Image: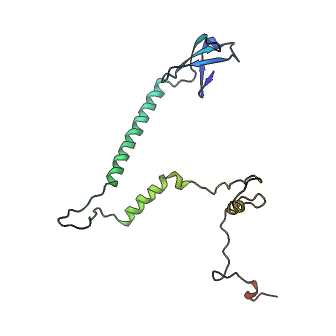
Amino acid sequence: MSWRGRTYVAAWMTGQACREVRVRYMPHHDHEIDICDASGKYLGPAHLADAATPEQLDALRTARAERARRLRAEVKAAETLRRQRFAPATTAGPAQRLGALTAAQAGDELAAVEHTDASKLALPDLIPPAAPPADWRTPPSLATRTTPDRPVSLQPEPVPDGPPGRAADPAEDGDAS
């Protein structure tokens, strides 16, 4: 029997295919469920079919504890870096921040932040949007990007030669025949 994406089995289930049943369970005890028929009569327990071994569970607990320790250390280090220190003042005036960084240190830290933000790593133009149905009213800017008869180009539009604001005229090149 499959329930919540897991498979449960029991010896008494043999020959019970296609029988309508109800599942009873205790929260936090998903290693075993109780099966009842459609009228509510108790049929028996069912156990998780592919339960992890005790060795696997120990390894998983160790890995989770290590990850939690590593994340706690990372949060502590981030708080230390985030904290700002100010120079002592004996007279009224603007606060003076302490803690000089080199340009290389600042660049390295900013580069590390960019590589951990998943939204900045996403490629929004990787798959062009599909054309909306013909009966939808779409703004012209969206309609031009999703026209079904004209594929969307992932390459930038070519820039015409010549000064800005003036279209290139082939007759000016001297090649006019």
Q: Nearer the viewer, residue 96 or 75?
A: 96
Looking at the image, residue 24 lies above or below residue 108? above
> Residue 97: horizontal and vertical position, in percent?
28, 63
> Residue 20: horizontal and vertical position, in percent?
68, 17
Residue 15 lies in what quarter of the image?
top right
Name the residue at 66% across, 13% down: 14
Indicate left or right for 40 with 145 as reference: left
Name the residue at 41% across, 33% down: 62
Indicate left or right for 77 with 170 as reference: left
Residue 65 lies in what quarter of the image?
top left
Extreme residue toward the right, this view = 177
Indicate left or right for 99 with 103 as reference: left
Q: Nearer the viewer, residue 32 or 66?
A: 32
> Residue 33: horizontal and vertical position, in percent?
55, 18
Q: How is the image coloured?
A: rainbow
For the N terminus, the quadrant is top right
> Residue 5: horizontal and vertical position, in percent?
60, 29
Looking at the image, residue 2 lies above or below residue 157? above
Q: Nearer the viewer, residue 40 or 117?
A: 40
Name the residue at 36% across, 42% down: 72
Exactly how many numbered labels are in the figure?
0
Indicate left or right for 128 with 134 as reference: left
Residue 156 lies in what quarter of the image?
bottom right
Name the residue at 46% across, 24% down: 54
Looking at the image, residue 164 lies above or below residue 52? below
For the C terminus, the quadrant is bottom right
Extreme residue toward the left, this view = 90
